[in-house]
Amino acid sequence: MSNSTHPSDTVRYGLIGSGMMGVEHLENIAHLDGAVVTAISDPVEGRREIGSATVTSFGGEAPALFADHRELIESGLCDAVVIASPNMTHVDVLGDVLASDLHVLVEKPLCTTVEDCRRVVDAAEAGPADRVVWMGLEYRYMPPTTALLAELSTGVAGDVRMVAIREHRFPFLVKVGDWNRFNRNTGGTLVEKCCHFFDLMRLVADAEPVRVLASGAQDVNHLDERYDGEVPDILDNAYVIVEFANGVRGMLDLCMFAEASVNEQEISVTGDRGKIEALVTQSLLRVGRRSDGLHVVDERPIGSEGVRHVGLHHGASYLEHVDFIDSVRAGRPAAVTLTDGLWSVAVGVAAHRSIDEGRPVTLDEVLSIS
């Protein structure tokens, strides 16, 4: 890495894409010890200015601003970059970053197609062995979810057989240029939004997905919107069943016109000995053991210890950044890899194909495994 006027253990960050999620990353970095934002790139001048104002609002020096991410990469001002540009740009932006020696955290989804995911996975594997390439699947870091995973590791649920995830929430937010209104830009709702949940299913199942069956539609949201004469085509509700190689089954219940819900996310893991539930908005963990009898459940509030910035994701993005910067400093491999990102996208792609074609879809088809 290039020389720095900051202390030797300071990590200098560059941000590529200063939209809503990019600003959240800036806020998280501002709360890290020994981290500074030295550069921001975004093709929209107003977004560059908002990014710069965010950095200085937390007491940082004004970062260098670039319209082109390649100028940021070549500037020598950064040790690590965060990619928070629109989904459809990830393959090219990440390809350019991976051609350098910079550490990188890329926002979800990895890319909008399986083919593009494969390209960047191959590029990362061909790069320096000591570089940290981190996949931004921060839902792993939501405190109730991490509590569920920790409880699961004790064996209290026994052999896991079922994973059920419900996300009942508000519609997609407005993004710069309304890019998130069309499947061609996002990869589709089940890639853009739900890659998080397919990643969690895979983590809990401890196996690879093999088959997907889905039903979904666009029934309520965005139907009265027009962009250059086009009506948005993003799904707003779906059920997705995922079967894993070890016999575990997962189910996603997604509704994006369900603001009137107590919990935005509910995760339930059931095994032959018991059941564990994480309620994300209420920040509760429930543990039930079959041996304790009917309706006996241990309910525990989950705190947010160690979270300096809650942000839009219940502190998960901040905790993800803590692990990322620790890995950069220690020279440890990423805890969440681009291969994890590839699998999460592949399940979403399979789910969309299942809806479009009205049939179960195997992951072999999507991944083109011979």
Image (spheres, rainbow, N blue to C red):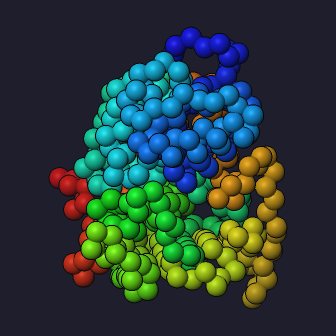
Residue 85 placement (x, y as % from top left): 44, 47
Residue 350 placement (x, y as % from top left): 30, 67
Residue at 47 percent across and 42 percent down: it is: 45
Q: Can residue 343 be seen in this view?
A: no
Residue at 48 percent across and 18 percent down: it is: 76
Where 244 falls versus 42 (above or below)?
below
Residue 32 placement (x, y as % from top left): 71, 36
Residue 310 placement (x, y as % from top left): 72, 54
Residue 299 position by quadrant: bottom right
Badge count: 0
Where 330 falls versus 25 (above or below)?
above
Q: Is residue 370 visible?
A: yes
Residue at 33 percent across and 35 percent down: it is: 95
Residue at 51 percent across and 46 percent down: it is: 47
Residue farthest to the left, as pictured: 370
In the visual, does 367 lie left or right of 335? left
Where 355 falls versus 90 (above or below)?
below
Residue 125 position by quadrant: top left
In the visual, does 171 lie left or right of 187? right
In the visual, does 366 lie left or right of 245? left
